[in-house]
Amino acid sequence: MLEITNSVAVITGGGGGIGLSLARYWVGNGGKVLLADVAEPLLAAAAAGLKDLNGDVRTIVCDVTNENDCSRMADFAIEQFGRINLVAPFAGIIKDGLMVSPDMATGKVTKKMTLNQFQSVMNINLTGVFLTVRECSERMINNNCKGLICLISSTGSLGTAGQINYSSSKAAMSVFPKVITAEFFRRGLAAKIRCVAVAPGYVGTPMVKKVGQAVLGKIIEQVPIGRLIEPEEVASLIGELYRNESLAGEVYFIHGGLRLGSKG
Ligand SMILES: NC(=O)c1ccc[n+]([C@@H]2O[C@H](COP(=O)([O-])OP(=O)(O)OC[C@H]3O[C@@H](n4cnc5c(N)ncnc54)[C@H](O)[C@@H]3O)[C@@H](O)[C@H]2O)c1
């Protein structure tokens, strides 16, 4: 079993939501955190809150779609802490919409998902994860670090209407744990650096809450446990995935029993 005490987590998208909850959990268990986000004001507020918890925390502004930013972030973690033990590339966005929207009255398409709407989600949720994981893995290997790469997929990876961009990004990313575990196995690294993903259902973060009360009510009707997942519950699952060294190469769902589009 791995211990969180004194281990170093690099968390992107750490300015809010699940990333920030994970950071709180990590410092609460004696770990150290490098928090990265594209939004500087969010980062500053997050860091202040973590320091109030006596957390050993550094921050870096980083756009995960930018290769140099990701490289700088990984270097900074090594400079500041000498190692990386957990990589949590949690920066992500949604830009929902139907691929094509026919008008109810005429039956003709009046609106389409734009190319930017598709590509910007893929860039952050997929390419950004690739860059973060590649740069951090390189430093972990070169600095002889032990730990976990923990990605964040979604129940959306199974296919959600209105999310062809988001669902595709999460479905593609869900194969990373298998590929990375197999590649590390080939090089004799798989026992040292494991890779998994968590796939939450609807979590009570700003990303979900911005849909408004009416839509939230409809979402919750579909969840057997009758509520959103708490970000702290996702963080606790990640803590267990980190500690338990038999867990590798898999996607772990956490969704309160949700079955998309049905009441089970
Ligand atoms: N909330 C949910 O229900 C839910 C469910 C499944 C998966 N997820 C995934 O969890 C992750 C975190 O989601 P959340 O709900 O905490 O969202 P959130 O919107 O609360 O936080 C996302 C963070 O990512 C940052 N970010 C956005 N673009 C960035 C970029 N280019 N570079 C660096 N940082 C960037 C934002 O500034 C924000 O702080 C996402 O990958 C999301 O897809 C969320």
Image (cartoon, rainbow, N blue to C red):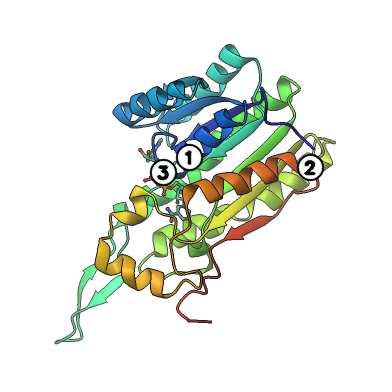
Q: Is residue 96 visible?
A: yes
Residue at image mark 3: 17
Q: Is mark 3 within 8 Å of ligand 1?
A: yes
Image side of residue 220 versus residue 179, left or right: left
* Up-down relation of residue 61 to residue 248 (above or below): above
Image side of residue 106 versus residue 9, left or right: left
**Disc 2 residue type?**
Glu
**Disc 1 residue type?**
Ser
Which disc is residue 245 wearing? 2
Q: Are marks 1 and 2 in contact (CB under 8 Å)?
A: no
Q: Is residue 161 visible?
A: no
- Residue at the spot x=61%, y=26% of the render? 31
Residue at image mark 1: 21
Which type of secondary structure does the marked residue at label 2 adopt? loop
Which type of secondary structure does the marked residue at label 3 adopt? helix
- Spatial distance from mark 1 to mark 2, Cα to Cα? 22 Å
Residue 159 locus on image (x, y percent): 48, 69
Alpha-carbon neighbours of circle 1 within 10 Å: few (<14), some, or many (≥20)? Answer: many
Q: Quadrant of residue 99?
A: bottom left
Q: Quadrant of ligand 1?
A: top left
- Residue at the spot x=37%, y=28% of the render? 43
Q: Are marks 3 and 1 in contact (CB under 8 Å)?
A: yes
- Residue at the spot x=43%, y=22% of the render? 52
Query: In the current view of this chain or complex, which residue is farthest to the left?
Result: 105
Q: Is mark 2 within 8 Å of ligand 1?
A: no
